Amino acid sequence: MIRGKILDHSGNVLAQTSVAEDGSETREYPYGNMFAHVVGYADQGKSGIESLANFELLTSNAFFLEKIQKEFQGEKNVGDNVVTTLDADLQEAAYDALGSQKGAVVVMEPSTGKILAMVSKPDFSPGDVAANWDSLNSDENSALLNRATQGHYVPGSSFKLVTALEYMRENADYDSYSYDCTGQIQAGDVTIHCYRGAVHGQVDLRDSLAHSCNTSFSNIGASLDIESFRETAGDLLFNRELPGDLPYTKSSFTLSGEDGEAVRMMTAMGQGETQVSPYHMALIASSIANGGTLMEPYLIEAVTNYTGTVIKEYRPEEYGKLMTSQEAAQLKDYMESVVEYGTASVLNGQSYTAAGKTGTAQTGQFSGGTELKNYWFAGFVPAEQPRYTIVVLQDTQAEPAFSSAAIFARVAAGLEILAP
């Protein structure tokens, strides 16, 4: 059986098998490294969609008389094609926007669950995996790792969305919250500062999220019921299985009643022991964008035979409610303020409206004496009626050339979101 093709949703070939005159077969990837992790490879085992759709790619639903004739003549039949939800142009925009930075970009349709783009860097050449297997496995940068789904990162201030939701659930009068930010707050012998020494003054809950006020969220964290906080984190799929088909690393939220005030404060502002993947953050942002409902994420849109006749189609399915529609609407409103006058004002004044949450996290991991940091942006466009969720993660020692919000803007520019 000749392995079938993997296509993007418009029919662009992402993987195909060429057959030489001597009958030898070569798996080809026309876009090179661009789809390395999500499409995967088919040598030295399989990964990505190559693994996920292996059965379909090696099953032929060609016209039965044609199959019989080829078998009679000793010729191989051609496997079915897999049409994905991926968009080659958008994948290219995300790939180029991330540049040489280690990290990941995930783009989804919150209303359907379709995954439109998934980039992970550093990457590799999927057609040369067998030849480079030893070096890839010993690579200190773990190029084979799909950082979008398998990465485990400190969420930083992007986690403040979870903390804000918990505060709203515990306090029906959350609109009346008020805190005077002096730029720092004390928790025992630990002093927590706002980012770059900022002093935000009097803030309500919206301002706290817009300005990503560490001291305000630390203050909130000290007041929260830990068991209730754990339940809310669980509602948002921390410590739980994630929907989807690609291998992933489960996110973790470890706060317990045994933790002291400093740990509670640090956790509330997105530091501490909490770990999450870009893919998981995309699920959370998508549920907010979709009125609290998370759609089942999926990558395969249809299976066709090699001539293009549709064998099977996949439709959007609801996964479940992660929050109420009222909670989602309030968080969405807060995320709009992040762009309107907060930490992502770089997105204000674009040809589209955006909403989201920035994040900068200290990881506690050092290389060459410099601490690694995780830079985040999780959001959606257009803000008023979200059509696309975009999550950007940069994992770096040095200050990145572009902020994660700026990378978000470059990806959004590739969406043509104003098109009907």
Image: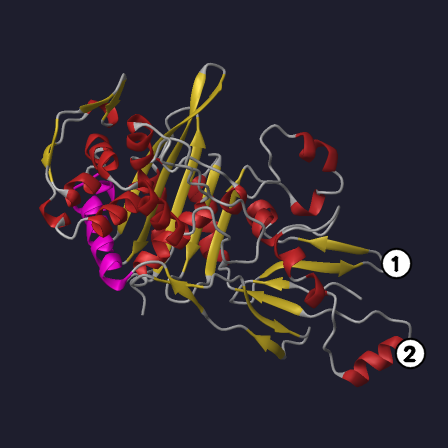
Which segment did they paint magenta? 324-353
- Density class for disc 1 (Cα within 10 Å; few <14, some 14-19, many ≥20) is few
Nearer mark to the viewer, of 2 and 1: 2
Marking on residue 232: none
Q: Which residue is mark 2?
A: 72
Residue 327 on the magenta segment: yes
Q: Amino acid at mark 2?
A: Phe
Which element type, helix, strand or loop, lies under badge 1?
loop
- Density class for disc 2 (Cα within 10 Å; few <14, some 14-19, many ≥20) is few
For the point 30% across and 36% down, the residue is 268
Horizontal arrangement in the rendering, residue 140 relative to residue 363 (left or right): right
Q: Nearer the viewer, residue 378 or 132?
A: 378
For the point 29% across and 46% down, the residue is 161
Horizontal arrangement in the rendering, residue 326 relative to residue 5 (left or right): left
How far apart are labels 2 and 1 at the CA level? 19 Å
Position of residue 301 measured from the top left corner of the image (x, y, whole percent): 54, 69
Q: Amino acid at mark 1?
A: Asp
